[in-house]
Image (cartoon, rainbow, N blue to C red):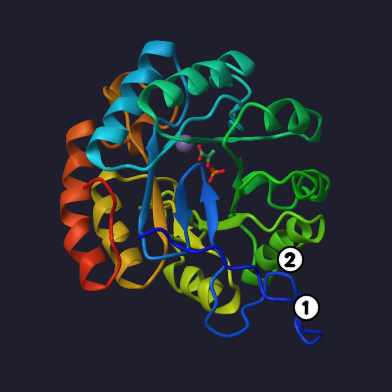
């Protein structure tokens, strides 16, 4: 059964972020294409870190769709730590994504990095991703707030939970309430994992706001072997979905190959996840 649209509750003076604050049991439902976040479905977003070629992204889109993923991911504008690393294919990559998404009949999400590119991308993408490094970019938050596109807002890796809520409020204040929150790991003192998945913070965000909350265990851990267990933990904790990176040959990936799941590992993740989702009274489509 399709989930009914629920309007985000009207503000209450007492909340510092009234447009996104939780008031009672009503969850905001956010759709990317025909996929609804925040309702009864636990949603899996998957794809490569970066779009590398038309063939690569088409293959990934097909795999994601066939395996039970519901939204395709892929970066065309990449915020890389080193200026010498692969920076993404830019608008050409967006076109590859669009074609792959249409062919596999699966919507896609991709990162937007600059205010200047918002208008151009708005007409071409199904959903925006705001990356961890841009969570504090208030001009970008305002510009996305002026659109009506769904947006996944990642938590800054050094941001407090309240700063994350305020960033979402910036978007909502422009009139765009189609916001999905994504916990992607924060910086801690443990070098064994790339970042530290703040699962408690993600559950806090779910209770504090009416917005859908998902996790990104790929960037949070950097370790493929931790991705499936943490995805199950997110489902068991009542969160709304997951975003994972996959690659058909991680050793050849142009970005984040070390943390990419192989297609086979992705199939295992889906198989291991389903009983947990169902035990929580939720469902997975196409699995
Ligand atoms: C990504 O999703 O590819 C990405 C760059 O994520 P983050 O902003 O969380 O580092
Ligand atoms: Mn990545």
Left or right: 39 as drawn, with respect to 270: right
- Whether tag 1 and tag 2 are in contact, CB under 8 A, the answer is yes
What x and y, as percent, mark residue 69?
32, 42
Q: Residues within 10 Å of mark 1 (few under 14, many from 20)?
A: some
Secondary structure beneath label 2: helix
Residue at the spot 61% in from the left edge and 78% down from the top edge: 22
* Residue sitting nearer the eye, 270 or 85: 270
The answer for how far apart the CA atoms under marks 1 and 2 are is 8 Å
Task: Quickly name the residue at label 2.
Answer: 166
Task: Quickly name the residue at label 1.
Answer: 16
Q: Is residue 219 visible?
A: yes
Q: Residues within 10 Å of mark 2 (few under 14, many from 20)?
A: some
Q: Is residue 155 visible?
A: no
Dot 1 or dot 2, earlier in sequence: 1
Residue at the spot 26% in from the left edge and 64% down from the top edge: 277
Determine whether 272 is above or below 149 in the image. Answer: below
Residue at the spot 19% in from the left edge and 41% down from the top edge: 267
């Amino acid at each position: 059964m399709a989930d009914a649209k629920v309007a985000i509750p009207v503000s209450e003076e007492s909340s510092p972020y009234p447009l996104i604050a939780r008031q009672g049991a009503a969850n905001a439902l956010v759709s990317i294409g025909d996929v609804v976040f925040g309702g009864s479905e636990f949603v899996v977003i998957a794809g490569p870190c970066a779009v590398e070629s038309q063939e690569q992204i088409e293959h990934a889109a097909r795999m994601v769709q066939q395996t039970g993923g519901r939204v395709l991911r892929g970066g065309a504008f990449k915020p890389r730590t080193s200026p010498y690393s692969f920076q993404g294919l830019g608008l050409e990559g967006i076109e590859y994504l669009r074609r792959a998404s249409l062919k596999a009949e699966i919507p896609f999400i991709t990162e937007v990095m600059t205010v200047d590119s918002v208008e151009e991308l708005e007409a071409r993408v199904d959903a925006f991703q705001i990356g961890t490094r841009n969570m504090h970019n208030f001009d970008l938050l305002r510009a996305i707030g002026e659109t009506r596109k769904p947006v996944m807002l990642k938590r800054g890796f050094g941001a407090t939970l309240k700063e994350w809520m305020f960033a979402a409020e910036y978007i909502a204040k422009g009139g765009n309430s189609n916001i999905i929150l994504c916990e992607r790991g924060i910086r801690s003192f443990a070098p064994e994992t790339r970042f530290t998945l703040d699962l408690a913070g993600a559950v806090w965000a779910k209770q504090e706001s009416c917005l859908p909350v998902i996790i990104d265990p790929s960037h949070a851990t950097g370790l493929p072997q931790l991705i499936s267990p943490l995805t199950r933990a997110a489902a068991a904790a009542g969160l709304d979905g997951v975003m994972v990176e996959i690659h058909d040959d991680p050793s050849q990936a142009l970005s984040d190959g070390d943390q990419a799941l192989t297609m086979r590992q992705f199939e295992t993740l889906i198989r291991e996840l389903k009983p947990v989702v169902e035990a929580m009274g939720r469902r997975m489509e196409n699995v």
